[in-house]
Image (tube, helix red, strand yellow):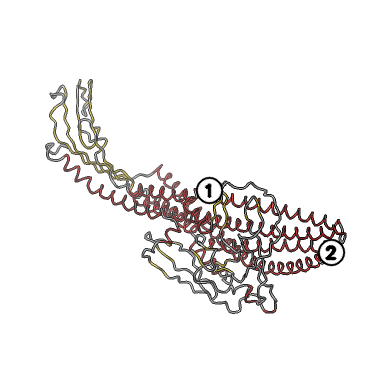
Amino acid sequence: MDSGSLERHPIVRIAAAAAAPMAAALLVVGCVSDEAARYRESAYHQQAQPPAPRVVIPSPSPQIAGAPQAPARVVDSLGIPTPPAVTAEPTPAVAGAASLAPSPNDAPPPPIALALDPKAGAQIAGKPLRVVTTTVGSTSPASVRPDPSTVAAAGPRRDDAFVPVTLDPNVKVPSPAVIPAPASEYPIDLATALRLADVDNPTINAARTLILEALAQQLTARTLLVPSLNGGVSYHDHVGPSQRSAGTILNLTQQSLYIGAGASTVTAGTLAIPGVSIFSQLTDAWYEPLAARQKVIGSRFNAMATANDILLDVALRHLDLLGAHAAFEAQRASEVEAYEIVRVTDEYSTTGEGRQADAERAKAEWNLRRADVQKAEEAMGVAAARLAMRLNLDPSVRLLPIGGPLVPLFLINLESTQQELIKIALERRPDLATRTAQIGEADYHKRQEIGRPLLPSLFFGFSGGAFGGGSNLATPLVGRFGGRTDVDVELYWTLLNMGAGNLALIKERDAQLGRAVAERQRTINRARAEVSRAMADSRAAYNKISIARAELVSSGKGFAEDLARSRDNVGKPIEVINSLHLLAEARIHLINALVEFDQSQFRLWVALGSPPPLVDMQRPGVSG
């Protein structure tokens, strides 16, 4: 379409036509860039920053007495609930509820702790060994364990009823190392391990990268109606017969040249490649951005769920490492005690006051204890390697846990009702939010296919440039250049395969929606099971701690009495060896019960929808 000279329209009209779409595209890119920058921050980094203004919607559900308060729903800038970090708050005791605290009639055992003493102990591979320390504290029921009906408002609470007192390790017993000494050691506490995994774990980083991929797809969907710009040069040369629209055949030599926005034009036809072009189905331009937004939301919560799972595994492996070191110290203490039995029985057998068989039996017991020490040392190396693998560290650098003594760590109130905890989990778990976003994405895709035959496809093209040419019938062959603009607007409706194709697409999208709903229901069932299992494990492990304490106190007293009788050559050596068996097993039972309880508390915490808390296990009642 010719509208005047070259000086009047090409640049001015092209700029006017492209200015608004380009501004819209820049606005979309800017919004997505800001959103992507926000998603790059880790969960712990966001918690450390001052909170941005948020809309808080109070929970409409009634509060159950004695249960953790249901968290308020937090809505982010996208208008979707964001699972906040779980905070432990004090809660009143439930009237008439069964209490796990000991009653005066139970005559609970005195508190016993496993403590770490780096200044005492024997030597292994030239390094000082920390020994197990035990103590007998007050027999008051209140000193055995705190009332679990409340949780400290400042964060996770520790059972600090233990009063560690060091055993007198006067006997230094040589014990060979079962694993080679590491080239270097790296002390690490729980909070450092969690922060390190949050930054360097490849699984978490891969999940966060999917957010950027979803943001790129969202940008593509939002720019479906943003025009594309083309510019170029096209030259046409025809030599030979040509047929006119009336059917006349002409022997024609024809040439033309176009320069400007767009390309590929012949004779009176419009440009095949417009300078400014839009081609999109309106149903895609409407629904694709909505579906892409749901995918971004789902990717975000999927990254949070992945981080929660990985960080929980890090916390559990750190507790395993801490328990392995405590078990090593317990086995080392049992070895020292076995060596004392060897020394006593050997003295009596040498002087003829005791039997040689008793001395040999004591030596066999000592060798068994040495084997247990070596197994415990091996378990420390394995636990350190597993934690290093999860932290993406070199396993040749031995990880040493910082923290102690190993005590029950209360994160969630044990008197909380299971129904309330499940309700909290269903409101804040990120994997459930991911499934909800997938349902929204599938629903928009279904609506998209329903509206596809109803909404037209849009084609818009604008071109402007210099055009000229000629033929053997209109000389010169290439000349008479001038300005040219072309504007084309087309709307058309499509019925795929007489409507059968559209119906098939609708059914396919409906099946995908049903699958997304089923996946969400399966996630709900898994959340309920995880909360219930973790809560049951916490209560059972807490009871195990009480039983293990009583076992340790009883076996400790029995061993002390039998050892004293053996030193006086009154009791039989087999009795003190049997008492040592019971004492060694009681120590390991207590360590396992403590580790199991702490791990179940972390599982319950994460099952409620938040990453593991940054607990400072070196100071009581302090959390990061």
Confirm whether residue 592 shows in the render.
Answer: no
Rendered image quadrant of residue 558: bottom right
| Residue placed most toward the observer, 462 or 375 | 375
**Image height check: is 326 above or below 260?**
below
Question: Is the Cβ of the residue at disc 1 closer than 8 Å to that at disc 2?
Answer: no
Q: Nearer the viewer, residue 436 or 196?
A: 196
Q: Please tell me whether residue 349 is drawn above or below residue 554 in the rendered image.
A: above
User: Could you say whether the residue bearing mark 2 is in a helix, strand or loop?
Assistant: loop
102 relative to 114, above or below: below
Mark 1 nearby-residue class (10 Å; few <14, some 14–19, many ≥20): some
Q: Which residue is mark 2?
A: 572
> Horizontal placement of 612 versus 494: left or right?
right
Nearest to the eye among marks 1 and 2: give it.
2
Q: Position of residue 53 (x, y in %)?
A: 36, 65
Q: Quadrant of the N terminus?
A: top left
Specify the quadrant of the image occupied by residue 400: bottom right
| Residue 160, percent from left and from top | 59, 70
> Counting other residues with Cα less than 10 Å from the Cα at mark 2, is it few (<14), some (14-19), or many (20 or more)?
some
Residue at left offset 62%, top offset 65%: 536
* Residue 552 appears in the rendering: yes
Distance of label 1 from label 2 (alpha carbons): 52 Å
Q: Say which residue appears at 61% left-offset and 56% top-offset.
A: 320
Q: Compared to 600, does 489 lie above or below?
A: above
Circle 1 SS class = loop
Q: What is the three-letter code of the residue carrying label 2?
A: Lys
Q: Amino acid at mark 1?
A: Leu
- Residue 85 at what x, y percent from top left? 47, 63
Q: In this figure, which residue is indicated by the disc labeled 1?
A: 393
Closer to the N terminus: mark 1 or mark 2?
1
Q: Nearer the viewer, residue 283 or 427?
A: 427
x%, y% of residue 110?
67, 72
